[in-house]
Amino acid sequence: MFGILSVVMVSCQEVNDLIIYPQPGQNDQLVIDTAKYPTVAAQVKNVLIEDYTGDRCDNCPNAQKQSIAIENANPGRISVIGIHCTSLAAPYAGKPDYRTTNGTNLVSYLIGIPGSLPQGDIDRKIHPFTTPPSVQLPYALWPFYVDSELSIVPKAAIAFNNKSYDAGSKTLSMDITTTFQQASTDTFYVSAAVIESGFRGIQELPGSYDSSFAFEHVLRKLMLPYNGLHIANAPTAGSTYSVKFQTILDPSWVPDSCKVVAFVHHRSPGNNVVEQVQETTVK
């Protein structure tokens, strides 16, 4: 075991700034990588949509349709994570639970427990017109806010190095490398998630149920720390940081339908804004 000195981890439960991480190679745990990688070239801004959803929410399929439409309108620029949460995502009898502990913790950290679904956020930005100001946005407004984010010059660029997938053990590993495109006085974190699309299950609809609904962008795993691994304080332009990522896919997941979504973001009260996001296939 070794220790990594981090800034104060801001949440209502965390008070220590010394976090101990497992040795590199530990599954489902982002770990600082001390290897040196080439700097990542400048990138255009990509946008993260987090869709808080549930299979017992009859309006949630419309939010999923909206996210797909936004993806199709902006090829390669949009990453979506569908986070099943609350009792509106409770599993049907004999069916799998799409909720995850880390996903539930993340939603609670970002917005508390939502009183209704669907909800969502665009790059985790707070929108002052809501009462109280919140990152939560109804899906009808997602396209407008996505368009405004796409024009931003990102502070960071992300690349994936040394990606490896072993079909026998279903183990995926890689390095997620971040290069800062400009100097900043801020503190930055990296998060990563495994999502799966295209599998079928029961979904409530208005007045009925679809027993073969095609779910998209579903969060399968969110790497620890669920609210981001600290990578940099006040980075200089061109500074590069990397973290190790390793996980084992569940046997029920289809590797060809899974992706890893990685993003660089802030993490403090009132500012969890995502600076850049990239995704890659498992295979």
Image: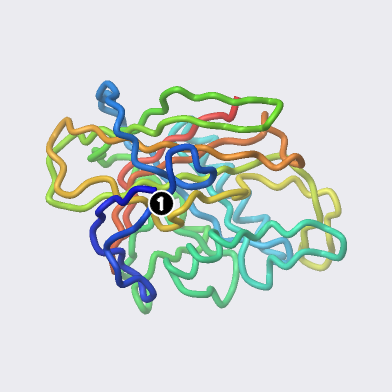
Q: Which amino acid type is shown beneath numbered disc 1?
A: Phe
Residue occupying image coordinates x 81% and y 56%: 202
The reply to whether residue 271 is visible in this rendering is no
Q: Nearer the viewer, residue 41 or 23?
A: 23
- Across and down, in percent, residue 272 comes to 33, 59
| Residue 69 drawn above or below residue 60 | above
Q: Nearer the viewer, residue 262 or 213?
A: 262
Q: Is residue 166 visible?
A: yes
> How many marks on residues?
1
Q: Residue at x 38, y 70 (%)?
A: 134
> In this figure, which residue is indicated by the disc labeled 1?
144
> In the drawing, does residue 151 fall left or right of residue 202?
left
Give the position of the C terminus as an image quadrant. Answer: top right
The answer to which of 265 and 134 lies nearer the viewer is 265
On the image, the x and y values in percent for residue 224 come to 47, 53
Query: In the figure, is residue 103 to the left or right of 32?
Result: right
Q: Quadrant of the rendered structure where residue 54 is?
A: bottom right
